[in-house]
Amino acid sequence: MSKKSLFITFASILLLIATFLEWGTGSVGGNAVYHFNGIDSNQGKISLILAILIGIFSILSYYIKKQAKLFNISILIISVANLVLLLMTIFKLNDIISLVNQLKGMGVSASLGIGIILSLVISFLILVLNLLTILKQDETKKVDSNIESPHNKVLEKFLPVLVPLISVVLGILLGAIIMWIFGYDAIWGYEELF
């Protein structure tokens, strides 16, 4: 596996782990401390799904060389969507935290957790790395390698199925992002649809 695909796959695994880490903490007095993970919220579940898709597309971009640019653009779109989702979540949490921290005199406080910050940093790294890869592919497109891999022959048979499948997944993802932007619960919408 190439270094780029390996790094993006590893980063997507870290992004998966970050959704299970603490995204926020609230405390009432000195006795009661409440923690919530990313998986406890709809945004965390969407981020988890996006991380899985990034990992899958990264692996597919290595094995299906002819469609590598399509997969890299898909990873770019998904990482931008995840970055926007995480930024909006951080802004919402920051507003809530500032309201809660006004009650500090009563022993109430709240703070961001390491999980959401780690998710944001990893999403940004995936975005930058993939953008550099796409730009590098355009520069090195003139170099032609005639090395045939047995994986390419097998995966070419599945290409007519993979391209529509990826298009459907990206369409559902785009629909979910649009629903979320306009304030609708995308998970509820797709549950009602299916």
Image: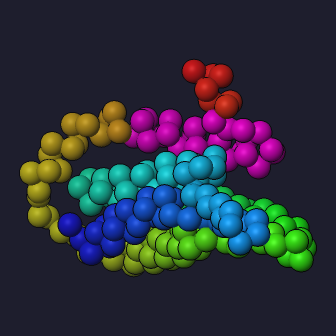
From the viewer's perspective, is 95 left or right of 131?
right
Above/below status of 41 relative to 175 = below
What is the residue that sits farthest to the front in this orientation? 31
Confirm whether residue 98 shows in the render.
no
Q: In this view, does 54 lie to the left or right of 59?
A: right
The spot of residue 148 in percent (x, y) is 11, 58
Residue name at image x 33 percent, y 72 percent: 7
Query: Most prominent secondary structure in the magenta stretch?
Result: helix
Residue 38 versus residue 14: which sits nearer the camera?
A: 38
Identity of the residue drawn at 41% across and 74% down: 133
- Segment colored magenta: 163-187
Q: Where is residue 138 in the image (x, y as percent from the top left)?
A: 42, 73
* Left or right: residue 106 compared with residue 63: right
Q: Which of 109 and 52 is in front in this view?
A: 109
Q: Which residue is drawn at 41% across and 67% down?
A: 14
Q: Residue 75: image x %, image y %?
A: 47, 59
Location of residue 189 with respect to 64 vertically, above or below: above
Q: Quadrant of the N terminus?
A: bottom left
Image quadrant occupied by the C terminus: top right
Q: Vertically, is 183 above or below 117?
A: above
Does residue 71 belong to the magenta stretch? no
Is residue 7 in view from this perspective? yes
Q: Going 44% across and 76% down the picture, which residue do you hit? A: 129
Is residue 171 highlighted in magenta?
yes
In this view, 189 is above or below 95: above
Which image quarter: residue 3? bottom left
Residue 171 placed where, x, y %? 57, 39
Q: What colour scheme does the image use?
A: rainbow
Question: Residue 102 falls in which quadrant of the image?
Answer: bottom right
